[in-house]
Image (cartoon, rainbow, N blue to C red):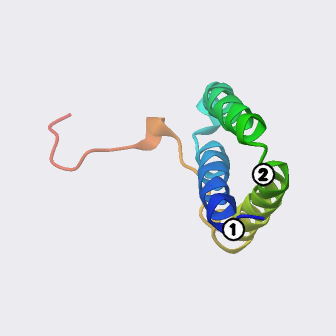
C-alpha cells in the first residue's frame, strides 16, 4: 500500500465530503451532485492506477475524519442560511 497516495486520496475525498456537509441546506443536493462528478474522476483514477486498497483506506479515513469534525464542531455550529447574512455598513 502506498501511503502517499492514500493520504492524497483521503484529503480529496474528505474535502468533498466536508463541502457537502457544510453546504447550505437548500443547496446541498446541487453540491452533492457536483461532488459526485469529482468522485467519478477519483474513481476513474483509482481504477486506471489499480489503487483499490488505497482508495478503500482513504474512503474510510475520510468518513471517520468528517464524522469527528461533525461530532466535535459541526453539531454546535450548524450551517446558516444565506438569507440571514447581513453586510455591516449597508444603508438598507
Q: Is residue 8 above or below residue 50?
A: below
Look at the image and tell me in which quarter the C terminus lies. top left
Q: Is residue 57 left or right of residue 87?
A: right
Look at the image and tell me in which quarter the N terminus lies. bottom right
Rendered residue at 32%/44% (across/down): 86
Distance of mark 1 from mark 2, alpha carbons?
11 Å
Give the image location of residue 45, x and y in percent: 67, 37
The residue indicated by pointer 1 is: 3
Rendered residue at 46%/37% (across/down): 82
Rendered residue at 74%/35% (across/down): 43
Q: What is the secondary structure assignment of the residue under circle 1?
A: helix
Q: Residues within 10 Å of mark 2 (few under 14, many from 20)?
A: many
Instruction: Name the one closer to the observer, 54 or 39.
Output: 54
Instruction: Name the one closer to the observer, 22 or 14.
Output: 14
Give the image location of residue 71, x and y in percent: 74, 70
Q: Which mark is residue 55?
A: 2
Amino acid at each position: 500500500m502506498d501511503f502517499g497516495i492514500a493520504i492524497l486520496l483521503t484529503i480529496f475525498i474528505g474535502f468533498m465530503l466536508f463541502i457537502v456537509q457544510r453546504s447550505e441546506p437548500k443547496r446541498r443536493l446541487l453540491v452533492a451532485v457536483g461532488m459526485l462528478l469529482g468522485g467519478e474522476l477519483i474513481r476513474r483514477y483509482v481504477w486506471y492506477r489499480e489503487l483499490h486498497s488505497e482508495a478503500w483506506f482513504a474512503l474510510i479515513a475520510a468518513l471517520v475524519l468528517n464524522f469527528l469534525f461533525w461530532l466535535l464542531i459541526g453539531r454546535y455550529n450548524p450551517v446558516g442560511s444565506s438569507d440571514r447574512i447581513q453586510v455591516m455598513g449597508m444603508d438598507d
